Image (cartoon, rainbow, N blue to C red):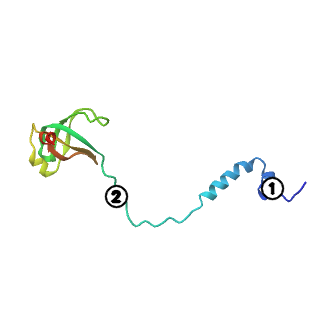
Amino acid sequence: MNLRLIPALRLTLILGPWSLVLTPAALSAAEKSPTPAAPTTSVEAPAAPKRHPLRGVITSVITEKSAFMVKHEEIPGVMRAMTMLFKVDEATFKAFKVGDALTGQMSRQGNNWVLEDVKPAAAAAKK
């Protein structure tokens, strides 16, 4: 028998079935050898909140929260029709009142539901 075997074959003969277990592990370890990571100088901005079109009617105004209670239509694939609280910006808060129909873009921002790009529903229908 020739004792001058390929090193991998010699290892297989010496370790027996353990070589089959160790060899993939050794290959895996070799593939995962530490490589220096490229330095990053910029911080990624948080992802923009997902926005959904909304159509509804203001049922009440909550002054201390700068928010409206809006009875809105179903938002397909997102939520059923319901009445819920939406925070709005100051200009929107001053421009609308109870009973006004509106359209806008709703999103979840932290613990709040927010309504943005709010327009009277009748004006949006004329476009």
Q: Quadrant of the N terminus?
A: bottom right
Q: Determine the residue positioned at 70% across, 52% down.
A: 23
Q: How many marks?
A: 2
Q: Residues within 10 Å of mark 1 (few under 14, many from 20)?
A: few
Q: What residue type is disc 2 on? A: Ala
- Can you give x and y, in whole percent of width and height, for residue 127 in the image? 16, 43
Instruction: Residue 56: name its quadrant.
Output: top left
Q: Residue furthest right?
A: 1
Q: Residues within 10 Å of mark 2 (few under 14, many from 20)?
A: few
In this figure, which residue is indicated by the disc labeled 1?
A: 10
- Can you give x and y, in whole percent of width and height, for residue 59 in the image? 13, 36
Relative to 42, 92 lies left or right? left
Q: Is residue 35 visible?
A: yes
In this figure, which residue is indicated by the disc labeled 2?
A: 45
Q: Determine the residue positioned at 37% across, 62% down.
A: 43
Instruction: Residue 11: name its quadrant.
Output: bottom right
Vertical arrangement, residue 81 with respect to residue 29, above or below:
above
Q: Nearer the viewer, residue 122 or 89?
A: 122
Q: Determine the residue positioned at 9% across, 48% down.
A: 94
Relative to 124, 76 lies left or right? right
Q: Determine the residue positioned at 12% across, 39% down.
A: 122
Q: Earlier in the sequence, mark 1 or mark 2?
A: 1
Q: Is residue 111 visible?
A: no
Q: What residue type is disc 1 on? A: Arg
Relative to 113, 4 lies left or right? right
- Can you give x and y, in whole percent of width and height, for residue 44 in the image? 37, 59
Tell me the SS state at disc 1. Answer: helix
Q: Disc 1 versus disc 2: distance between alpha carbons?
A: 54 Å
**Residue 120 circle label:** none
Tell me the SS state at disc 2. Answer: loop
